[in-house]
Amino acid sequence: GLKIVAIGGGSSYTPELVEGFIKRYDHLPVRELWLVDIPEGKEKLNIVGNLAKRMVNKAGLPIRIHLTLDRQQALQGADFVITQFRVGGLRARALDEKIPLRYGVIGQETNGPGGLFKGLRTIPVILDICKEMETLCPDAWLINFTNPAGMVTEAILRYSPLTKVAGLCNIPVGMKMSVAQMLQVEPERIHIDFAGLNHMVFGLNVYLDGQNITGQIIDRIAQGDTSGIRAKNIIDLGWEKEFIKALGILPCPYHRYYFQTEKMLAEEQEQARKTGTRAEVVQKVEAELFEKYKDPKLAAKPPELEQRGGAYYSDAACNLIDSIYHDRKDIQTVNVKNQGAIASIPHDSAVEINCVITASGPKPIAIGDLPIPVRGLVQQIKSFERVAAEAAVTGNYHTALLAMTINPLVPSDSAAKKILDEMLKAHQKYLPQF
Ligand code: NAD
Ligand code: G6P
Ligand code: MN
Ligand code: MN
């Protein structure tokens, strides 16, 4: 049987992961699931952990659930390590979203200044985990969900000797499911060629039963049916019809921040006034969820979890683990070392791309290159992620300022410096390297 470790085990998403392992138990025999958290997360860990135990009992399966604050004990002999933690919690996320807004800049957890700071807080922790894995479970796969997943994967590839690493996001699988729903066909009949970076990924071609239907999908989007490219956590302001036609490929929901910056900023500012930023909305959803989770009669994932942005995240994780374990050689979209799959991105950088999933890991499928109109933006975000990762590792102020300034959502050097200084101060507690 397998030993699986989930770091950030107190996450409200954990019941979905548990459900994923229960569903697949007949071919994916999980012997132990270790949920790891930190002292601040102990209460959440207990509530989620007890729900997980009830779920497993109800299913009548011999999966042993362990709850611990001792990460090293958990990592000992692990087969798969799933990371899904949030350094500083939702309070830090709220600052990431609010501070940039004061300077007229997008406030978002994985894009712009917010993404930079989530990375600065997260990367030292993930590199510590990698270091522990080198000795405690050198053969294990690290499957990272922790955002910003692209920047985090980039940092691991550059600053850790671990090679069994994959970054995951629910957006590609979510787009595939939504396109299937839009066409009212089984998801297995849809295939999308995904390539780009995390939260900067494009659907280059869409196929139904092997027939290229990209043009048809583009027309549907242009006509106003954006259901195939939405996410719960991102406001849908439609797309400029003629732009979508000109683009000719599927943008992901996060592209709105780059191609609709003004409108998205105005919308964020209004939401911040009316309901609070996304982190504040999520705080309420989470509080309600945990009240439900406490109910000793509850032994399943409640439907309210669907209000969160991470739909299908456990399918992404469980399918990846399943295909590595069984050497299935199927195609999944994963953040891995590029190795030439996208010509204009460095060989040793992380990309989000379709891969063949084998027992020796995900093998990226070469696409040639991205279309010229989006190539530059993707390269720019890659440069941003690299400089940001370097800043996270070195704690160098000037490197952080460079990262902030070259981000396309930040308009100037002086705005960058002001936002950087304010955010460094606000997040000081979680930035020991600075
Ligand atoms: P959350 O706030 O519930 O955090 C999960 C747990 O992490 C908490 O219980 C917290 O105590 C714990 N934690 C904080 N610091 C830790 C540390 N140093 N070590 C171990 N545990 C720690 O967050 P969430 O909303 O469940 O999201 C978790 C993470 O997953 C976030 O980084 C989020 O951005 C990411 N996420 C990614 C995707 C994706 O598509 N890649 C989807 C959903 C969520
Ligand atoms: C999407 C993204 C995740 C992100 C989440 C936010 O699913 O792919 O990377 O963490 O949304 O959802 P939330 O409900 O926390 O706003
Ligand atoms: Mn994501
Ligand atoms: Mn800039």
Image: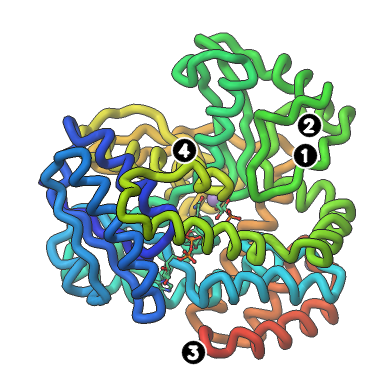
Q: Earlier in the sequence, mark 1 or mark 3?
A: 1
Mark 3–mark 2 distance (CA, rounded to whole Å): 43 Å
Query: Circle 1 — which element?
Result: helix
Up/down of 286 relative to 134, above or below:
above
Task: Name the residue located 48 percent from the left edge and 74 percent from the top edge.
Answer: 87
Mark 4–mark 2 distance (CA, rounded to whole Å): 22 Å
Task: Name the residue located 88 percent from the left edge and 58 percent from the top edge.
Answer: 266
The image shows residue 195 at horizontal and vertical percentages of 57, 38
Q: Earlier in the sequence, mark 4 or mark 2?
A: 2
**Quadrant where the image shows the C terminus:** bottom right
Q: Amino acid at mark 4?
A: Thr
Task: Name the residue located 42 percent from the left edge and 61 percent from the top edge.
Answer: 11
Residue on which the image places disc 1 = 373
The image shows residue 411 at horizontal and vertical percentages of 85, 68
Q: Nearer the viewer, residue 187 or 419?
A: 187
Residue on which the image places disc 3 = 432
Q: Earlier in the sequence, mark 3 or mark 2?
A: 2
Task: Name the residue located 55 percent from the left edge and 76 percent from the top edge.
Answer: 120
